[in-house]
Image: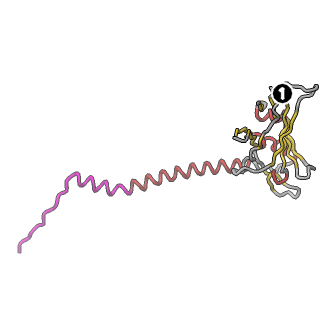
Amino acid sequence: MSDEQKPVSKRSPKTKIAILFLLALPVGITYMNNQFSSSRKIASTEQEAAMDTAMASSDLSESNPKEFQKAFKYQLLKSAQVTDYSDGMRLHLGHFFMSDEAGAKISVCHRFPKIELHFSAEGMAESGEVPRTIVRGSCRVAPDGLHLEGIIVDLPRQQNYQWVWTGIKLVSSDQSESLEVSGYEIISVLGTPLNFSE
């Protein structure tokens, strides 16, 4: 009997590199996917944490009456902004939760469905009186749950009038209750008067 040896096939270095690459490819893809996935989870977790913090800060239902009087004003005003749409300027306020007469947590809009925005004409007088006007709107929670839907600010068009936002009044359905914010309090939170010119 003859012992025949089978020839050992030798692979070229290029073939070895290609095989190693093909074997390493799934490992690399899995590693990269895990890296990107964890980045997405971290960003998502940070966004969720920020939303939870914002929602928690808007919950004033456990506040005592003295704390509530300060906190609701800040919550309404801290993110106040004016946007300009085709149908006019809108003033957006912050949303908050409060307790009802029974102590249950409710939206401010549930207890106070009407909003009045008070304005005065800066530097003007008619018959010795500063012109004043009130813009009325409905209290509705915006889709984000953190703000109220914008109230259209349709002010009288008087020549050279610069209207200054001087107050907010949230009013109950039967008008027996209200929450009010003065012009001074608006300035103390915003840092400056909010003017509306023509």
> Quadrant where the C terminus lies?
top right
| Residue 46: image location, x then y, percent | 61, 48
Residue 150 percent across, percent down from the top left = 74, 44
- Foreground pick, 97 / 164: 164
On screen, residue 2 versus residue 60, left or right, reads left
Horizontal and vertical percent position of residue 183: 84, 34
Task: Tell me which corner region of the image, top left, top right, bottom left or bottom right, holds residue 90.
Answer: top right
Three-letter code for the amino acid on which mark 1 is drawn: Glu
Label total for image = 1
Residue 165 occupies quadrant: top right
Is residue 80 toward the left or the right of residue 4 in the image?
right
Q: Please name the residue shown 89% across and 28% down the image.
A: 130
Q: Residues within 10 Å of mark 1 (few under 14, many from 20)?
A: some
Q: Is residue 84 visible?
A: yes
Instruction: Give the quarter of the figure containing the N terminus.
Output: bottom left
Mark 1 sits on what residue? 122
Secondary structure of residue under mark 1: loop
- Can see residue 61? no
Rendered location of residue 31, percent (x, y): 43, 53
Q: Nearer the viewer, residue 6 or 102?
A: 102
Q: Residue at x 67, y 49 (%)?
A: 51
Residues in magenta, as a range: 1-26
Tell whether position 66 is magenta: no
Image height of 185 relative to 64, above or below: above
Which colour scheme appears in the figure? secondary structure
Q: Between residues 149 and 17, which one lies in front from this camera angle? A: 149
From this view, report whether residue 117 is shown above or below residue 41. above
